[in-house]
């Protein structure tokens, strides 16, 4: 068991790819021994995309702390709350652009700004194709500020047999980048 437990923020935007958020939440439920706390932020569009793509509203049943997008009194809005990492999955290009520009117009972008200023781990699972030069420059700006760009690009060498396993090739990587120890597929491993 990992001695230090991670205090994590998960943001979910309205980019296509709600399956990534679902699989990440499923994994977090299995990583309870590595978690201190999980704060969850949804954009309004994220909820609609989840319902459209996954055909349910299971996000309403998550056993984590859910904050409203305009609640700037939420602990995630301050560095003094001591969150270790933030994963935004999927991360829309609009959210990426606001983070890259330092525009904290909602709790998700404020939390990302706090994570960057505190030199903690910000992992953005960006979901768009093709990429414009503006997208690429925004990714560069976030990476230069200390963020990690983790494209929602699944891998196939683990031979995933369903969409959840395929999505897990991305979310397991994001969780690993945020500091979690996972038993999933590792190249050269099993």
Image: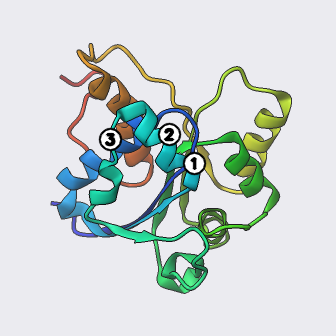
Is residue 132 rendered to the left or right of residue 126?
Answer: right
Mark 3 or mark 1: name the one nearer the start of the chain: 1
- Pointers 2 and 1 in contact (C-beta within 8 Å): yes
Return the x and y of residue 101 as percentages of the image width and height. Answer: 82, 57
In the current view of this chain or complex, which residue is farthest to the left? 1
Q: Residue at x 48, y 33 (%)?
A: 17
**Image quadrant in which the N terminus is located:** bottom left
Q: Nearer the viewer, residue 119 or 70?
A: 70
* Gap between marks 3 and 2 measured at Cα: 10 Å
Q: Secondary structure at mark 3?
A: loop
Q: Secondary structure at mark 1?
A: helix
Residue to which mark 2 is pinned = 49
Q: Nearer the viewer, residue 68 or 162?
A: 68
Q: Is residue 99 above or below residue 162?
A: below
**Image quadrant in which the C terminus is located:** top left
Return the x and y of residue 187 as percentages of the image width and height. Answer: 32, 23
Residue to which mark 3 is pinned = 56
Return the x and y of residue 172 as percentages of the image width and height. Answer: 35, 39
Q: Residue at x 24, y 62 (%)?
A: 34
Q: Residue at x 33, y 14 (%)?
A: 157
- Pointers 3 and 1 in contact (C-beta within 8 Å): no
């Amino acid at each position: 068991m990992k001695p230090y437990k991670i205090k994590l923020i998960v943001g979910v935007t309205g980019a296509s790819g709600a399956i990534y958020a679902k699989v990440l939440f499923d994994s977090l439920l299995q990583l309870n021994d590595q978690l201190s706390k999980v704060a969850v932020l949804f954009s309004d569009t994220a909820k609609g995309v989840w319902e459209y793509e996954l055909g349910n509203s299971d996000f309403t049943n998550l056993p984590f702390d859910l904050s409203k997008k305009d609640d700037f009194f939420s602990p995630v809005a301050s560095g003094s709350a001591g969150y270790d990492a933030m994963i935004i999955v999927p991360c829309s290009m609009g959210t990426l652009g606001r983070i890259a520009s330092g525009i904290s117009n909602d709790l998700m972008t404020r939390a990302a700004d706090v994570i960057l200023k505190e030199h903690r781990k910000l992992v953005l699972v960006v979901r768009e194709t093709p990429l414009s030069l503006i997208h690429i420059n925004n990714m560069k700006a976030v990476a230069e500020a200390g963020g990690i760009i983790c494209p929602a690009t699944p891998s196939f060498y683990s031979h995933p047999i369903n969409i959840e396993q395929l999505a897990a090739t991305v979310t397991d990587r994001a969780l690993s980048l945020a500091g979690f120890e996972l038993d999933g597929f590792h190249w050269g491993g099993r």
